[in-house]
Image (cartoon, helix red, strand yellow):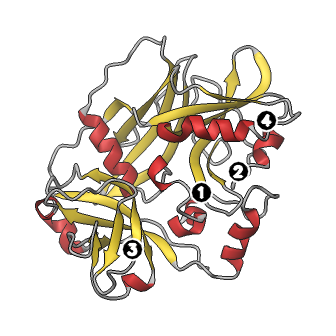
């Protein structure tokens, strides 16, 4: 956000924090004695050396929680997931928990299962049997947060809005677990913080739209260029080392009073004011701002050339104008 935009927001506006249900999130288990080698050959990030986290502890560090992508042979992201190594009942075998968009969980699990072959691995979509919760906090409230024996949890990167740092955690629990006190208002906070983190999440509407670098995936530690092969690895590596990426993820916002019914959901195309013939990019994620109710916050994937001059519009060449905001992290130069 620009300084002018920051100053225009209502800084004293109370923000709902705490625990909320995340109906858009699902869960996949990849378990078995060959689970490590199997996932190492499928994901953009390494799973080697990932430490198992046992409740009441939560996975909190890069040694216990990682972001990873799953690509097609053409190097396009089919899915993204936060993963951790979790206990598997009384068994000593590995069980990886992949927190993933629920609308692509079943298809991702099915596709992964096609490559199991003779490996001692099971890929199970448990999205209908487990619930995913989100926890938003301030003032380091995540640090003392502990899990119940049946839960799996991991901490996500903090999000800074103005001078306040917000912590976030994903928690999964079986549907048979006693429900917690959940406030739906917190769901809006979670969604906005996810957008403002500028860490993308693949949903059904954006599957196979991006090589990882197009949405800054390498800059948010979602790609390990030193690991071995995985589907699409050659294309991802070529994009990195030959500098051919001409699109990037950016943060933007639009005024609600300018929408006039225009959709701002993931997958909606964006256009440059000087080129009506083809889209300049698409919406990756979006959320109603909880820090300024007059605006919608967005993650967009956009041509770098289109960002240099002119206006970027939502939905059509005549759609509302998007205002660009700075990223909260530096990009790895390509």
Can residue 59 be seen here? The reply is no
Q: Can you tell which of label 3 and label 4 is closer to the viewer?
A: 3
Q: Position of residue 219 (x, y in %)?
A: 57, 66
Residue bearing mark 2? 43
Residue bearing mark 1? 77
Q: Secondary structure at mark 4?
A: helix
Around disc 3, counting alpha carbons within 10 Å, would you say few (fewer than 14), some (14 to 19), or many (20 or more)?
Answer: many
Quadrant (top left/top right/bottom left/bottom right) for the C terminus: bottom right
Around disc 1, counting alpha carbons within 10 Å, would you say few (fewer than 14), some (14 to 19), or many (20 or more)?
Answer: many
**Image: 109 above or below 12:** above
First reached walking from the N terminus: tag 3 or tag 4 = 4
Quarter location, residue 161? bottom left
Q: Position of residue 66 (x, y in %)?
A: 62, 47
How far apart, in angstroms, are the residues tagged by discs 1 and 4?
A: 21 Å
Q: Secondary structure at mark 3?
A: loop
Q: Position of residue 51 (x, y in %)?
A: 72, 38
Q: Can you tell which of label 1 and label 4 is closer to the viewer?
A: 1
First reached walking from the N terminus: tag 2 or tag 4 = 4
Residue at 69% x, 16% y: name it. 89
Find the residue positioned furthest to the left.
257
**Image: 288 above or below 304:** above
Q: Secondary structure at mark 1?
A: strand
Task: Tell whether label 2 touches label 3 (CB within 8 Å).
Answer: no
Residue bearing mark 4? 35
Around disc 4, counting alpha carbons within 10 Å, would you say few (fewer than 14), some (14 to 19), or many (20 or more)?
Answer: many
Task: Tell whether label 4 touches label 1 (CB within 8 Å).
Answer: no
Q: Can you tell which of label 3 and label 2 is closer to the viewer?
A: 3
First reached walking from the N terminus: tag 1 or tag 4 = 4
Residue bearing mark 3? 279
How far apart, in angstroms, are the residues tagged by discs 3 and 2?
A: 29 Å
First reached walking from the N terminus: tag 3 or tag 1 = 1
How far apart, in angstroms, are the residues tagged by discs 3 and 4?
A: 40 Å
């Amino acid at each position: 956000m620009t300084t002018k935009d920051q100053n225009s927001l209502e800084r004293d506006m109370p923000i709902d924090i705490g625990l909320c249900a995340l109906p858009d999130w699902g869960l996949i288990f990849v378990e078995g004695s060959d689970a490590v080698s199997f996932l190492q050959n499928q994901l953009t990030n390494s799973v080697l050396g990932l430490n198992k986290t046992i409740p009441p502890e939560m996975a909190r560090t890069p040694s216990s929680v990682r972001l990873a992508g799953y690509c097609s042979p053409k190097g396009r992201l089919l899915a993204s997931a936060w993963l951790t190594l979790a206990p598997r009942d009384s068994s000593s075998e590995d069980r990886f928990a992949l927190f993933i968009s629920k609308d692509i969980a079943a298809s991702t699990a099915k596709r992964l299962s096609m490559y199991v072959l003779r490996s001692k691995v099971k890929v199970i979509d448990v999205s209908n049997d487990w619930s995913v919760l989100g926890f938003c906090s301030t003032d380091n409230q995540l640090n003392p947060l502990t899990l119940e024996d049946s839960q799996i949890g991991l901490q996500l990167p903090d999000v800074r809005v103005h001078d306040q740092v917000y912590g976030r955690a994903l928690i999964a629990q079986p549907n048979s677990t006693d429900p917690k006190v959940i406030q739906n208002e917190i769901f809006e906070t979670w969604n906005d913080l996810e957008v403002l983190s500028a860490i993308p999440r693949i949903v059904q509407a954006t599957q196979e739209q991006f090589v990882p670098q197009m949405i800054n995936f390498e800059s948010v530690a979602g790609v390990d260029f030193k690991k071995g092969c995985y589907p699409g690895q050659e294309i991802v590596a070529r994009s990195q080392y030959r500098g051919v990426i001409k699109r990037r993820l950016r943060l933007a916002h639009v005024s609600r009073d300018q929408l006039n019914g225009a959709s701002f959901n993931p997958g909606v195309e964006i256009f440059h004011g000087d080129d009506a013939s083809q889209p300049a990019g698409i919406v990756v994620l979006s959320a109603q701002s909880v820090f300024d109710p007059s605006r919608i916050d967005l993650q967009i994937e956009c041509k770098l050339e289109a960002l240099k001059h002119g206006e970027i519009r939502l939905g059509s060449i005549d759609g509302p104008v998007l205002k660009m905001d700075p990223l909260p992290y530096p990009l790895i130069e390509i």
